Image: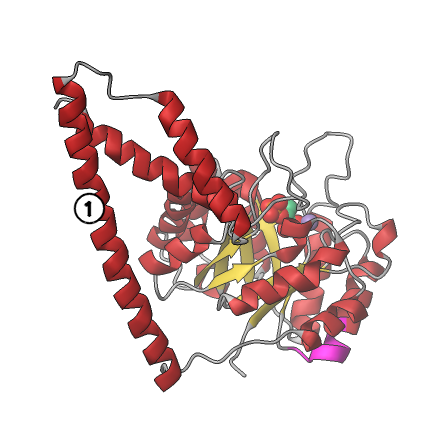
Amino acid sequence: MNKHNYILGPCAAETQQQVVETANELEAGLGKDFVFRAGVWKPRTHPDSFQGVGAEALSWLMQIQQERGISCATEVATAEHTRLCMEAGLHYIWIGARTVTSPFLVQQIADTIAQSPYRKQLKGVFVKNPVSADLQLWIGAIERVRKAGVEHIAAIHRGFTPTPDSQSEYRNAPIWSIPIELRRLYPTLPIIADPSHMGGRRELLPLIAQQAADLAFDGLMLECHPTPKEALSDHSQQLTPKQLIGLLQQLHWHEQREADHTLLFLRQQIDETDKQLWQLLLRRMQIAKQIGEHKQQQNLPVLQSSRYEEILQKRLQWAEQNGISTDTVKQMMELIHEESVRVQIKK
Ligand code: PEP
Ligand code: MN
């Protein structure tokens, strides 16, 4: 099995006893090979919600780190949080999803790291995705931290705020294509998944964690609490430390190996099919062009909505009959239609 990075612990550090108890149980099941997480300052939507204990909780984490040799991590949202963590000698910090949406704040955090006399003690920075599905904003934050001289950076995919019309059962649904694109652009950047904040509900965590392992993520961030139902934040998504250890034991990580003969054979068939798809697509475009010329001769408009609607409905029916996502097919047809319109209008 490959080595994976686990960042585990409560959503928030609530009391010293809760922090110690959680760390004890995790250590009993996993040894010291994980990063212990706990929010010291909590970015809450409403001012009446629990905002985190603040700097005092940082000293509880430092005790875990110094006395047990378990590296700890917390979220920083301001230059002041960053300064306090660096001064204390905390090994890891992360920038949360809300903060990543603000380039000014991220820059202030990056500048604080760059200028800190304690920066050598910092082992790494995790950058969560922004709340909206904006890869460039995520990359911008990663680059700001990189330019501050931080060598070890990991990206954390924690899902995106649902739109009002989305019917997802997730709190922040993952959009896997976004971290996959990030991996293509930054092949050596570790990418970690945060099923707790994606799912928002305990029951969903094993499935999401396995999906992340299947997609070759480099690790997981997961929340746990000695008495999850009484947690002061994110109570529906936290597991007990024992349940969390059980989840990790059930997980199946895959090996990264050279492709074997079967895989090479199947990939050849994919290449062959793509070639045919490409030829068909080209042919479709040529026909669209001929249609465009014909419409012009006959003085007909390029866009004929009823015909497009007929095409779309028929293709969606095919998708449904074959168990393929209608959303995906709709997006595909929209792109193809857009290109057909583009080749038909005057340039
Ligand atoms: C957290 O990790 O507890 C947290 C607040 O996460 P996010 O920034 O992903 O909402
Ligand atoms: Mn949380």
**Within the image, what quadrant is residue 332 found in?**
top left
Image quadrant holding the C terminus, namely top left
- Label 1's element? helix
Above or below: residue 335 compared with residue 72: above
Residue at the top extreme of this rendering: 299
Q: Residue at x 64, y 42 (%)?
A: 168
**Front residue of 189 and 315:** 315
Numbered disc total: 1
The range drawn in magenta is: 26-32
Q: Quadrant of the N terminus?
A: bottom right
Which residue is labeled 1 in the image? 283
Q: Is residue 78 left or right of residue 231?
A: left
* Residue beneath the point at 61% across and 29% down: 164
Provide residue 270's location: percent of width, then percent of height.
32, 67
Q: Position of residue 64 (x, y in %)?
A: 70, 68
In the displayed structure, does residue 167 sit left or right of residue 273?
right
Nearest to the observer: residue 102 or residue 41: 102
- Which three-letter amino acid code belongs to the residue tagged 1? Arg
Q: Is residue 107 visible?
A: no
Q: Nearer the viewer, residue 145 or 161?
A: 161
Q: At 42% from the left edge and 35% from the top edge, which residue is drawn?
A: 312
In this rendered view, identify the residue nearer to me: 265 or 180.
Answer: 265
Vertical position of residue 153 compared to residue 78: above or below: below
Residue 292: image location, x then y, percent: 18, 27
Whether 40 is drawn above or below 190: the answer is above
Q: Main secondary structure of the magenta part?
A: helix
Mark 1 is surrounded, within 10 Å at the Cα level, by few (under 14), some (14 to 19) or many (20 or more) other residues, namely few
Residue 30 quadrant: bottom right
8 relative to 295 in the view: left or right: right
- Residue 291 shows in this picture: yes
Q: Position of residue 248 (x, y in %)?
A: 68, 72
- Horizontal arrangement in the rendering, residue 252 relative to residue 309 (left or right): right
